[in-house]
């Protein structure tokens, strides 16, 4: 199909029959900056609604005409209560499990681990929704003009439409300074008459195709149901919703219980109406009549104080926040929000060029990725990821979970938890390079808490010093192995988080981060000093028991000793701990032990197909799933750089063989990881091909959320890291400019991209060649750049700058 033909088909799929072609073309102009997502129809499904957030509070805005729906989230509204899932039987079973593994009796080892070593309860607690606000408009009509958008430069979402009754505009954002979700509605000519109801958290509906299909289905919609409306929820015993004064509605409730764990949290949601019409309270909610301007101020909170304290008072908090916000004008709240948001978002820019494709609505661009040249869509994807990180992870909030903070129901996919065998780490891959170091603080705080719960797990399960976390954790910082040994009995989750945080320090050179991080690194390292075992065949030190996440070897269970990823992560952990220890002049004896142990870890191995071995044994060709989504053993190439094109060419060749065998088709995050890997290995065209499959409708929903499927935010973040990795790389004490530039991005520009050692880069290129750059950082700092494969040493001047080019 020709490019033109593909475009025409995609457009006709979503053109609502009720709007004429003329009406559509007379609608809004494409934005000048391009930094927005925009649509010509409201959201029919959750994956079309637009996400807003301040790190803690989230809202999905549907932009519907007859019934606006704001789906709400609060980042501490999880199931269950404080709990300690460590299994005391584990320690006595541990030597036997190890012995069975050393004797290659994998099936028996798996069975014993399954009965003796797993967490109690076996499953963790789940993140959930805080319900919905529904605004039902009286006498709604089909619009003659309609547009909704999300402006990434202000973090404000707008809906604008005209009907026979007038012109209507809505603006929504989530304010960090005022801690409220704000929806501002105005009517030019017409009137705003609507009923406002609150619907409590409920289960979301997922069909098998939500898990097995791709986002493509959502692009196939033939028509728009302009007056779509959902039913209000039924009352539940856990929820009370009442008028709270003449112009506010207050809902209070309890979270849901978790596996073998009672419900331990209370939550409150309060919405306050400020308007120039009449507000009255009824049985079901509030009625607003005869207004031309309405502002809704929504606060949400739970009784969560921290992972072992749930004594907060959410009702008082939501009253205070809504009343305080109501004392300010809408404009003042909005201005404070935009100022605060821009301080983060404005730090970095990316321009990859612009074609006419960029003038189309966002959903049509996603649908046509593989058939039209649209470099600006990659830049938009990058900036959308930055927007998502700012909106889901700010100092003081919870870290971004599997869905950031946006979740529709109480039955979230994979519990919308912290899966720390790839997903949580991937969430933070772009943070530092993309100028959002401030957003990493929640991850550091979570790991500080995990180091406390994980110390109990280490003692109880392994009789070891230090701390350990396995493949998942939750709001309550559970650290024991869950879900069964083939997924959960992996001791390197905490170590990988530590290395991710070390990278954060390496980028920022922030002394406070270093001093908070050192005890975490030290504890994680002590755990491995106590638990690594000698390979009976003398190949070196190994973890045992473990798995290669979440792949299987063919011998009856996934359990094994010393998978490649573990050895690679622990090598990085030990290196980071010893660097941190020497920088802070701490624990010299321990540091020597750590470096000695590091040198004895079994090295990476090349197998019979020339591949990098995923396991210590050469099992790769014998596994059932040759295209497995995880590429754990390639950790050493990216995000680590232990294996790299400069120092270890034979191993990088083996990694390339492994990656080719795995193929490019994977889940959203699996695709994003492959993108980062091809970029790291300097293969720009291959990386770009993988990027197109990530940005296209198989792996990206109309609202630009990543499709695992279902929605999982890691792909958005990993994708952004990969896009940057094609343009700038920072590893091995070098800053590499344009290392994997594809032909599709001949000219472009970046501003504010960060590199290790506190460096910041602005750069422009034309016709595939570097044109100019400015490097800034600490005055007098020496840096080694690599440009066109050649090393270039530079020294920053007294103002902390180095300038090259016109
Ligand atoms: C890991 C992955 C899955 C999914 C889940 C949340 O288990 O293997 O694909 O991303 O985390």
Image: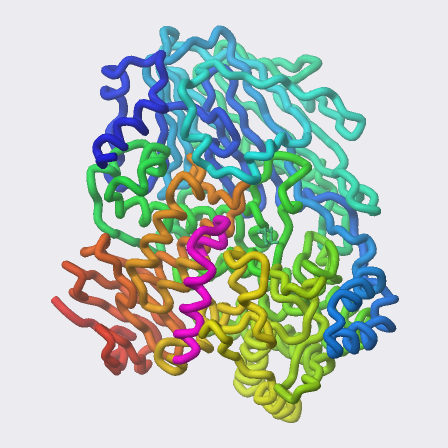
- Magenta span of residues: 650-672
Placement of 472 over or under 243, stated as above or below: below
Q: Position of residue 484 (x, y in %)?
A: 74, 57
Q: Does residue 333 appear left or right of residue 678 in this picture?
A: right
Residue 323 visible within the image: no
User: Along the line of sight, which residue is nearer the eye, 722 or 234?
Assistant: 722
Q: Number of numbered discs present?
A: 0
Residue shown at the point (80%, 62%) measured from the top left: 111
What residue do we see at 53% from left, 10% from top? 289
Residue 63 on the magenta span: no
Write the residue at 69% across / 81% down. Answer: 532
Q: Is 376 positioned to the left or the right of 274 in the image? A: left
Say which quadrant the C terminus sits in: bottom left
Looking at the rendering, which quadrant does residue 569 occupy?
A: bottom right
Q: Main secondary structure of the magenta part?
A: helix
Could you tell whether 157 is left or right of 379 in the image? right
* x then y, percent, for residue 570: 59, 77
Residue 579 is situated, as x and y percent measured from the top left of the image, at 53, 83
Of residues 498 and 12, the one nearer the viewer is: 12
Left/right of residue 87 with respect to residue 104 in the rendered view: right
Q: Position of residue 52 (x, y in %)?
A: 49, 39
Above or below, 75 relative to 616: above
Q: Quadrant of residue 787?
A: bottom left
For this rendering, which residue is in front, 236 or 279? 236
Q: Is residue 381 visible?
A: yes
Please say if 220 is above or below 515.
Answer: above
């Amino acid at each position: 199909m020709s490019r033109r033909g593909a475009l025409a088909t995609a457009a006709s799929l979503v053109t609502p029959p009720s709007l004429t072609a003329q009406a559509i073309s007379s609608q809004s102009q494409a934005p000048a900056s391009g930094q927005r997502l925009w649509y010509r129809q409201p959201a029919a499904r959750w994956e079309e609604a637009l996400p807003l957030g301040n790190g803690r509070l989230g809202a999905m805005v549907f932009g519907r005409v007859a019934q606006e729906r704001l789906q709400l989230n609060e980042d501490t509204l999880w199931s269950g209560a404080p709990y300690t899932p460590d299994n005391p039987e584990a320690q006595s079973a541990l030597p036997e499990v190890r012995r069975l593994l050393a004797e290659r009796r994998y099936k028996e080892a798996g069975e014993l681990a399954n009965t003796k070593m797993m967490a109690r309860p076996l499953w963790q607690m789940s993140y959930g929704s805080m319900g919905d606000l529904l605004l039902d408009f009286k006498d709604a009509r089909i619009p003659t003009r309609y547009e909704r958008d999300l402006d990434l430069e202000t973090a404000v979402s707008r809906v604008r439409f005209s009907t026979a009754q007038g012109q209507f505009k809505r603006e929504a954002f989530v304010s960090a300074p005022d801690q409220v979700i704000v929806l501002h509605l105005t009517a030019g000519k017409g009137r705003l008459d609507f009923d406002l109801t609150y619907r409590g958290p409920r289960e979301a509906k997922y069909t098998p195709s939500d898990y097995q299909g791709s986002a493509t289905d959502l692009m196939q919609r033939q028509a728009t149901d302009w007056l779509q409306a959902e039913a209000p929820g039924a009352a539940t015993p856990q929820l009370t919703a009442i008028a709270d004064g003449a112009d506010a509605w207050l809902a209070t409730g309890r979270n849901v219980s978790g596996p073998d764990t009672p419900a331990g949290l209370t939550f409150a949601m309060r919405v306050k109406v400020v308007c120039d019409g009449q507000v009255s309270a009824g049985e079901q909610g509030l009625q607003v009549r005869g207004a031309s301007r309405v502002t809704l101020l929504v606060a949400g909170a739970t009784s969560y104080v921290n992972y072992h304290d749930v004594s907060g008072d959410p009702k008082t908090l939501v009253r205070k926040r809504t009343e305080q916000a109501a004392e300010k004008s809408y404009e003042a709240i909005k201005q404070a929000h935009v100022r605060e948001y821009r301080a983060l978002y404005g730090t970095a820019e990316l321009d990859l060029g612009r074609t006419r494709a960029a003038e189309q609505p966002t959903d049509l661009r996603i649908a046509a990725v593989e058939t039209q040249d649209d470099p600006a869509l990659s830049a938009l994807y990058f900036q959308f990821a930055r927007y998502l990180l700012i909106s889901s992870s700010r100092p003081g909030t919870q870290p971004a979970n599997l869905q950031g903070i946006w979740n529709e129901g109480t039955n979230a996919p994979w519990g919308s938890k912290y899966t720390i065998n790839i997903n949580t780490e991937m969430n933070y891959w772009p943070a530092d390079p993309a100028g959002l170091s401030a957003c990493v603080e929640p991850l550091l705080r979570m790991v500080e808490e995990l180091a406390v719960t994980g110390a109990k797990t280490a003692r109880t399960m392994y009789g070891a010093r230090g701390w350990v976390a396995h493949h998942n954790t939750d709001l309550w910082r559970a650290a024991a192995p869950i879900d069964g040994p083939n997924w959960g009995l992996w001791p390197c989750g905490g170590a990988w988080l530590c290395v991710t945080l070390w990278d954060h320090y390496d980028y920022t050179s922030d002394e406070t981060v270093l001093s908070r991080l050192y005890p975490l690194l030290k504890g994680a390292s002590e755990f491995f000093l106590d638990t690594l075992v000698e390979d009976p065949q003398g190949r070196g030190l190994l973890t045992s028991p473990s798995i290669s996440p979440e792949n299987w070897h063919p011998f009856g269970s996934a359990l094994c000793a010393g998978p490649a990823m573990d050895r690679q992560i622990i090598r990085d952990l030990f290196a980071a701990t010893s660097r941190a220890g020497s920088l802070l002049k701490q624990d010299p004896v321990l540091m020597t032990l750590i470096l000695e142990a590091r040198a004895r870890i079994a090295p990476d191995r090349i197998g019979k197909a020339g591949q990098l071995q995923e396991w210590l044994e050469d099992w790769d060709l014998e596994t059932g799933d040759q295209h497995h989504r995880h590429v754990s053993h390639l950790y050493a190439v990216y995000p680590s750089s232990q294996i790299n094109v400069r120092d270890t060419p034979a191993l990088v060749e083996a990694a390339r063989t492994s990656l080719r065998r795995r193929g490019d088709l994977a889940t959203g995050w699996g695709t994003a990881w492959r993108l980062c890997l091809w970029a790291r290995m300097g293969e720009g065209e291959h990386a770009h091909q993988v990027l197109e499959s990530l940005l296209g409708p198989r792996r990206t929903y109309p609202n630009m959320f990543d499709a695992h499927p279902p929605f999982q935010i890691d792909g958005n973040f990993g994708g952004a890291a990969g896009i940057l990795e094609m343009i700038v790389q920072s590893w091995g004490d070098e800053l590499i400019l344009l290392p994997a530039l594809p032909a599709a991005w001949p000219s472009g520009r970046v501003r504010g991209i960060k590199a290790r050692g506190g460096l910041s880069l602005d750069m422009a290129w034309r016709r595939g060649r570097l044109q100019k750059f400015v490097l800034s950082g600490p005055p007098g700092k020496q840096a080694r750049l690599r440009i066109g494969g050649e090393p270039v040493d530079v020294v920053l001047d007294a103002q902390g700058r180095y300038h090259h080019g016109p």
